[in-house]
Image (tube, rainbow, N blue to C red):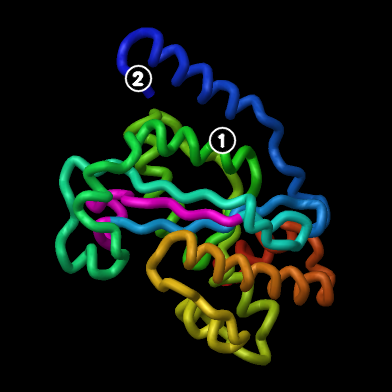
Amino acid sequence: FEKGSDGRRVFEEALAAWQKRPAEDMSRSHFRTRYIVVDVESSGLNMVRDSLISIGAVAVREGVIDANDAFEVVLRQDEVSSHENILIHGIGGSAQREGVEPADALLAFLDYVGRAPLVAYHAEFDRAMIGRALREFLGKDLDLPWIDLAWVMPELFRELIDGQVVLDEWLQRFDIENILRHNAVSDAYATAKLLQIAIAAGVHKGEETPESFASIEKTRRWL
């Protein structure tokens, strides 16, 4: 957002408008829900010290991946990440320095998400990185429900894998291609395909709502 009183007012109005949007009904069917599958790239794996570099997201609406309902942004970095880090995610120094101002990028992300439930694989990292950036640049917590497929999938497919494994193992099990590993949108798209499989299995087992997936995750975490 632009600096100055006018820019601040626009920023506050945009944030207020997002907060007033109605929350998703978690008791509705998967097929009446808009899920947002999220993946992030960062300057490292330290959730306290490292910086959020990019966010990628893909919508699964009514059980279908909507290729036209996707989001990608690179946040401008004051300090470019290490060469070793760039080799992982492929976002070079110029792209990092010329990225979108973090506050603008995060506002755009919130506008894209609306109040939809967020889905990720090993969601704790994505949630922590996005949450810390929101607090730093917008002064706002992301009070949206998250569903972590790393906990849900083992419950739905006990006969295949009983426990948490890396995302790539599930992708291999179901022959899901990840076109560009460690690209936020590509990883989100692959995870969205995994969510579709989870939805189909969930419906077969009577787990027919986002609320039921959240309950599965809560129970398995407790156990």
Look at the numbered disc 2 and give the secondary structure of its residue.
loop
Q: Which residue is drawn at the image coordinates 69% and 37% (left, top)?
A: 23
Residue 198: mark in rendering? none
Report the magenta residues as a range: 43-58
Residue with the mark numbered 1: 111
The extreme bottom residue here reads 159
Residue type at mark 2: give it.
Glu
Task: Verify whether residue 185 appears in magenta.
Answer: no
Is 43 in front, or is 87? 87
**Whole-percent x and y of residue 75?**
33, 43
Q: Is residue 76 visible?
A: yes
The image quarter containing residue 147 is: bottom right
**Whole-percent x and y of residue 113?**
59, 43
Which quadrant is the N terminus positioned in? top left
Q: Is residue 69 left or right of 32 when viewed as pictured?
A: left
Q: Which residue is drawn at the image coordinates 67% and 83% (left, top)?
A: 157
Of mark 1 and mark 2, the one earlier in the sequence is 2
Residue 2: mark in rendering? 2
Q: Is residue 51 left or right of 187 when viewed as pictured?
A: left
Q: Is residue 222 visible?
A: no
**Whole-percent x and y of residue 120?**
53, 61
The extreme top residue here reads 5
Query: Crowding near pointer 1: few (<14 within 10 Å), some, many (20+)?
Result: some
Task: Verify whether residue 54 appears in magenta.
Answer: yes
Q: Is residue 53 left or right of 220 when viewed as pictured?
A: left
